[in-house]
Image (tube, rainbow, N blue to C red):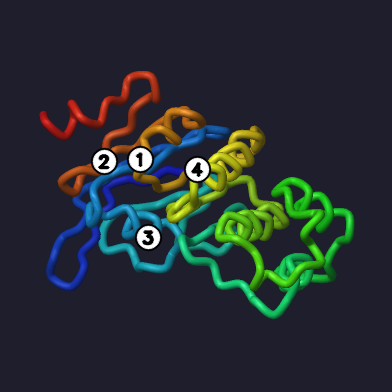
């Protein structure tokens, strides 16, 4: 579903990624891990076309990132997703849904129920907790017919209960291919099938049961 080959990226004159290759198969849940500044956001932004590719190729769902078709296959949730605090949860979702055409009522309800916000749908989101806001952002992602989800620190700043709620939702999405960046090894162990470890401008992918971050960093 995601195929990155020989990706090299710079920030100004500093090289961030060097000859990075990564493949993520259909229905995998892969965590992207590494120290702060290792290049996780650079990798994600390269995949999404936010950063132009210096060297290398990226294919998503078999489509080159230079083409347009892949965008309909991907939904992206940034760490800080811009919602509208004066609107209700339902109105926010309806607004984003309308960007691709008339909102479908059954799909709106399905997404709100999936992220456990149906009962709070009529409340203005300025009264939502951070966990509720993050779940609403995830609900917006799930409205679109994308089979690849990319999330940047989806549980950042959440309390343990909020993190558990997000993880349970992600774990239930067995028909999706998911890549998300995270610093929390406990949550990675709960739901991931694979881990992509970004270290010293290189990336190595492991099956979850063979990954040990501490020994890798020491080595």
Q: Which residue is drawn at 19% across and 49% down?
A: 201
User: Nearest the camera: 6 or 215?
Assistant: 215
* Mark 2 or 3, nearer chain start: 3
Real-space CA distance between mark 3 and mark 1, rounded to the nearest whole angstrom: 13 Å
Return the x and y of residue 41 as percentages of the image width and height.
35, 58
Side of 201 where 45 appears, left or right: right
Q: Which residue is drawn at 35% across and 40% down?
A: 22
Q: Point out the frontmost of discs 1 and 2.
A: 2
Q: Residue furthest top?
A: 209
User: Nearest the camera: 176 or 109?
Assistant: 109
| Tag 1 residue | 22
Return the x and y of residue 55 as percentages of the image width and height.
26, 58
Return the x and y of residue 42 as percentages of the image width and height.
32, 59
Side of 175 where 186 appears, left or right: left
* Mark 1 or 2, nearer chain start: 1
| Tag 2 residue | 203
SS for callout 3: helix
Q: Point out the frontmost of discs 3 and 4.
A: 4
Real-space CA distance between mark 1 and mark 2, rounded to the nearest whole angstrom: 7 Å
* Mark 4 or 1, nearer chain start: 1
| Tag 3 residue | 46
Q: Are marks 3 and 1 in contact (CB under 8 Å)?
A: no
* Mark 3 or 1, nearer chain start: 1
Q: Please give the label number shown on residue 160.
A: 4
Q: In which quarter of the image is residue 199?
A: top left
Q: Point out the frontmost of discs 4 and 2.
A: 4
Q: Which residue is drawn at 36% across and 67% down?
A: 51
Q: Which residue lies furthest to the bottom in this view?
A: 86
């Amino acid at each position: 579903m995601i195929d990155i080959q020989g990706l090299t990226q710079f920030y100004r004159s500093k090289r961030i990624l060097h000859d990075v290759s990564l493949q993520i198969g259909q229905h995998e849940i892969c965590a992207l891990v590494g120290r702060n500044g290792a290049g996780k956001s650079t990798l994600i932004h390269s995949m999404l076309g936010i950063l132009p590719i210096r060297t290398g190729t990226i294919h998503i769902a078999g489509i080159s990132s230079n083409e347009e078709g892949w965008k309909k296959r991907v939904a992206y949730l940034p760490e800080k997703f811009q919602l509208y605090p004066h609107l209700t949860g339902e109105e926010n979702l309806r607004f984003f849904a309308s960007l691709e055409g008339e909102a479908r009522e059954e799909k709106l309800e399905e997404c709100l129920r999936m992220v456990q916000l149906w009962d709070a749908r009529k409340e203005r989101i300025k009264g939502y907790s951070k966990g509720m806001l993050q779940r609403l952002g995830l609900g917006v992602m799930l409205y679109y017919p994308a089979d690849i989800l990319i999330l940047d620190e989806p549980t950042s700043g959440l309390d343990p209960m909020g993190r558990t709620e997000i993880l349970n939702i992600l774990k239930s999405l067995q028909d999706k291919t998911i890549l998300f960046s995270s610093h929390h090894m406990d949550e990675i162990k709960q739901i991931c099938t694979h881990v992509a470890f970004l270290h010293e401008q290189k990336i190595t992918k492991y099956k979850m049961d063979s990954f040990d971050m501490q020994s890798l960093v020491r080595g």
